[in-house]
Amino acid sequence: MISNLITPWLTANKRVQPGVFEIRLDSFPHPLSYHVKVHKRRKNAAMEIHNGTVVVKVPPHCNQAMVETFMSQQQQWLKQRLRHSATSTAFKRAYESGEPIWFFGQKLQLEIIRDAKTAWYLNQDSEVITISVSHRVKDVTKHVRAQLHAFYMYQASRYLPKIVKQQESRLGLVSTSLDFKFYQWRWGCCYSSGKIIFNPLLLSAPKEQIDCVIIHELCHLKHMDHSKAFWSLNKKYCNECENTKKWLKQYHNEIYFPPT
Ligand SMILES: [Zn+2]
């Protein structure tokens, strides 16, 4: 990940030992624990994040003070990386209250309650989506997932057709029909018949990113491949592609609802 030369300190008496340590850094409100790994053939110190754990890899001649200096120099990087790993790689959907639910790029909080009926309720002002699961239901997570799908399906079928129409008249390319289907890694899909399918989970993304996927699929009405001609047409109408790719990848763990 990152590698900084710390060879100038060669006077190490107490060599660093592998293990778990704690450090206080200015940018962190609490002491941060980290793992030290000593590598015989390393020349530089390096820092990595593994599943939210900080790992510092050092050459054998390092002492503890050098490791701490190194970490303190890298604390801004560390803070960024830890924040990133907390929001993306480390997150695992368990269908529990408090989990994030993305809607038009806004992070809502999932609230699960037991009630007389199974349904979803959106309260965008308080940034909460409530899933109520009937008392009679035993497999709660399965019903929470189904309600979340119902929520996105409802929102997508209400929002996307009108936005697609706007983009169709802007691009002068018109689909024959629209449909919605949940996929894990796909956001849209265009058939030679002119039919376009959108993943309702696309509604998790900010509006610019939704537009970008719509424009992408509409451009396929003219070019069914990802040829140069396709991208040059696409570029005429959209310059969000890189941001969209990044956004959808970064939050994928929080957007996709794995089967229970
Ligand atoms: Zn494509």
Image (spheres, grey):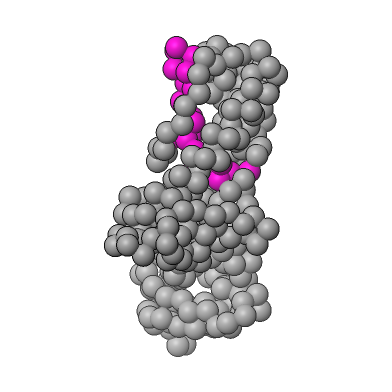
Classify the position of the C terminus by image quarter: bottom left
Foreground of the two, 39 or 154: 154
x and y, in percent, of residue 151 in the image: 50, 46
Residue 57 locus on image (x, y percent): 43, 69
Percent position of residue 134, x then y: 38, 60
**Position of 19 relative to 214 (above/below):** below
Question: Which residues make up the magenta segment?
Answer: 186-206
Give yes or no for residue 193 being in the magenta stretch: yes
Q: 112 or 209: which is nearer to us?
A: 112
Q: Nearer the viewer, residue 37 or 24?
A: 24
Residue at (58%, 54%) from the top-left corner?
A: 122
In this rendering, the answer to whether 112 lies above or below 217 is below
Horizontal arrangement in the rendering, residue 237 relative to residue 22 (left or right)? right
Residue 25 coordinates in the image, percent (x, y): 61, 79
Residue 253 visible, this angle:
no
Q: Quadrant of residue 109?
A: bottom right
Q: Which residue is rendered at x = 59% and y = 67% of the image?
A: 79
Position above or below: 235 against 62? above
Q: Tell how many labels.
A: 0
Residue found at the very far bottom of the displayed protein: 14
Residue 69: name its quadrant: bottom right
Image point 67% across, 30% down: which residue?
A: 239
Q: Residue at x 55, y 45 (%)?
A: 204
Q: Is residue 193 visible?
A: yes
Q: Residue furthest left?
A: 138
- Can residue 237 be found in the magenta stretch? no
**Is 65 located above or below residue 173 in the figure?**
below
